[in-house]
Amino acid sequence: MAVFEDILEKAKEITYTAGKKTGEIYEVSKLKWQVMQVNNEVKAIYEKLGSSVYGMVKADYENPDLVASIVKEIDILLEKLNIINEKIAKLQKINLCNQCGSKNPVDYAYCFKCGTKLQNDFPGDGEQEFAYETSADEETSE
């Protein structure tokens, strides 16, 4: 009977782990969707900025307040994008470099791309996983 109980306990453990991983994958997928939406918003505002500047040049007119407000919109969205990407990195247990934005395995002390000392935001939980993915900047340049 002990063997059956061991098998049952192991099955429960596997089910729990699978459920936890599924939840993490779902959260990452939601966040990636948000990244895509924010990137689209940023592109639209870049177009708005370009169109505004073009119109001002054609009309020989300057409106620095308009340009500054559009730039501020972009900055706000880029900060939102950084926050979302940091959340994704934490869920995937990836350490982002504050200097260059590269994604590093959690056990690295220094960025493999630029050599900057990394802040390890992950307490020793025994799980060290690394899933390399392109950053938002790399995705938008494709």
Image: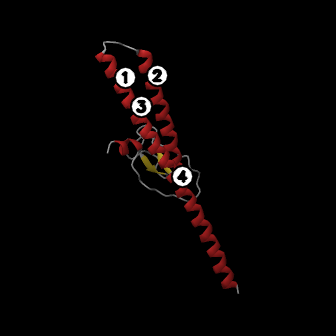
Quadrant location of the N terminus in the rendered image:
bottom right
Task: Name the amino acid type tagged 2.
Answer: Ser
Q: Is mark 3 on a helix, strand or loop?
A: helix
- Spatial CA span between label 1 and label 3: 10 Å
Instruction: Give me the disc on residue 91.
Output: 4
Q: Where is residue 66 in the image (x, y as percent from the top left)?
A: 43, 19
Q: Quadrant of residue 47?
A: top left
Tell which of 112 and 85 is nearer to you. Answer: 85
Q: Please tell me whether residue 107 is drawn above or below residue 35 in the rendered image.
A: below
Task: Name the amino acid type tagged 3.
Answer: Ile
Instruction: Give me the disc on residue 52.
Output: 1
Q: Is mark 1 on a helix, strand or loop?
A: helix
Question: Image point 49% across, 53% down: which residue?
Answer: 107
- Asked if the residue under mark 4 is in contact with the one under mark 3, i.e. CB atoms within 8 Å, the reply is no
- Spatial CA span between label 3 and label 4: 29 Å
Question: Image point 39% across, 49% down: which residue?
Answer: 134
Where is mark 2, residue-wise? Answer: 69
Quadrant location of the C terminus in the rendered image:
top left
Where is mark 3, residue-wise? Answer: 45
Question: Image point 49% across, 45% down: which residue?
Answer: 34
